[in-house]
Image: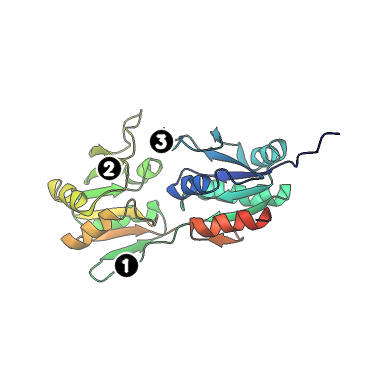
Amino acid sequence: MALETATPTHLLILGGTAEAAALARRLDGVPGLQVTSSLAGRTTGGRDLPGSLRVGGFGGVDGLAAYLATAEIDLLVDATHPFAAEITRNAAAACAAAGVARLRLQRPAWQPMTGDRWEYVDAPATAAPALGRHGANVFLATGRSDLAAFSHLGDKHFLVRLVESPQAPLELAHATLVTGRGPFREAEDRALLQKHAIDVVVTKNSGGDGAYAKLAAARALGLPVVMIDRPPEPEGETVASVNDARDWVLARIGR
C-alpha cells in the first residue's frame, strides 16, 4: 500500500519589492511549503525568483478571493510597496472573505536626521501646492503613477527618475527623464541634483536603503524635501523584517 503524501502548505507572496524577493529566496526549499510570488507587472524586473510566479492583477477583491480559492492558497504575505494601498486593502478583504491567514511585511518608514529639511504632506495632490514655496527645478521621485498630480505646474521643470522609460510621454509640461534601478549611491545622487540645479526634492516615504541616497544628498546640499506620508493600513498583523515574516510562515507550517 502506497504511503500518502501530505499536501504542502501554499504561500502567496504579493511582491514587487526587495523584501518580497528576499522572503521568497529565504523560504526556497523549505519542506512542506509551496511558494508562489505575484508581481503586478509594471516593470520587467524581479522575475528571477524561486518557486512559482504569477504576473498581473487579480481583478479587485472578488478576483483575488477567487484566486485564493482556486489556487488553494493557505497563507498570504503582503510584501507590496508601502504605497500600493489598493492591493493591500484588497488583500485584507479577500483574505478575510476566504479565511486565509495574512501578514503584512512593510519596511520601516524613513525618519528625519539632523540637517534634514522635510515638509510632510499626505498625498501627491497636496505635494504640488507645496512646491510654490520653492524654486523652479524639482527632482520628482514619486514614481510614474503620480506624475499627473504635477501636470498643471507649468512654471516648474521636473527631473523625473523612473525604473524604465515609459511607453507614453510624461504628463508634465517641462521634464527631463532619467532611468535607473536602485540601490543608488549618495555621491551619484548629489552629483545628479547639482547637475540639474535642483531646488527641492519630492518623494514618498517608501523606506528602505535602495532609494535613500537622494535624501542623504539633499541633506548634504541643504535642499528641502517634500515628503509624502504613507497611506493608512488596514488592521492586521504586521512585521518590519524579512526574518520576522519567515518566522511567521514557518510557525504556521509547524517548523
As rendered, which of 46 and 190 lies closer to the eye? Answer: 46
Nearer the camera: disc 2 or disc 3: 3
x, y percent for residue 59: 61, 36
Q: Residue at x 31, y 48 (%)?
A: 183
Which residue has dot 2 on it?
A: 160
Q: Position of residue 109 (x, y in %)?
A: 41, 61
Q: Secondary structure at mark 3?
A: loop
Going by the numbered disc 1, the residue's amino acid type is Pro
* As drawn, 228 above or below 117: above
Question: Residue 125, relative to residue 224: is it above or below?
Answer: above
CA gap between label 1 and label 3 equals: 30 Å
Could you say which is closer to the camera, residue 30 or residue 144?
30
Tell me if residue 140 comes above or below residue 106 in the rendering.
Answer: above
Mark 1 or 2: the one toward you: 1
- Report the residue marked by disc 3: 45
> Which color scheme does this rendered protein use?
rainbow
Which of the marked residues, 1 or 2, is nearer the chain's N terminus?
Answer: 1
Residue 219 found in image quarter: bottom left
Task: Look at the picture and state if 163 lies above or below 205.
Answer: above
Q: Are marks 1 and 3 in contact (CB under 8 Å)?
A: no
Dot 1: what SS? loop
Q: Which residue is mark 1?
A: 112
The CA span between labels 1 and 2 is: 23 Å
Q: Is residue 232 left or right of residue 9?
A: left
Residue furthest front as drawn: 1
| Image quarter hosting the C terminus | bottom right
The reply to whether residue 249 is in sight is yes
Instruction: Classify 10 Å Cα crowding around label 2: few (below 14), some (14-19), many (20 and above).
Output: many
x and y percentages locating residue 84 in the rendered image? 49, 48
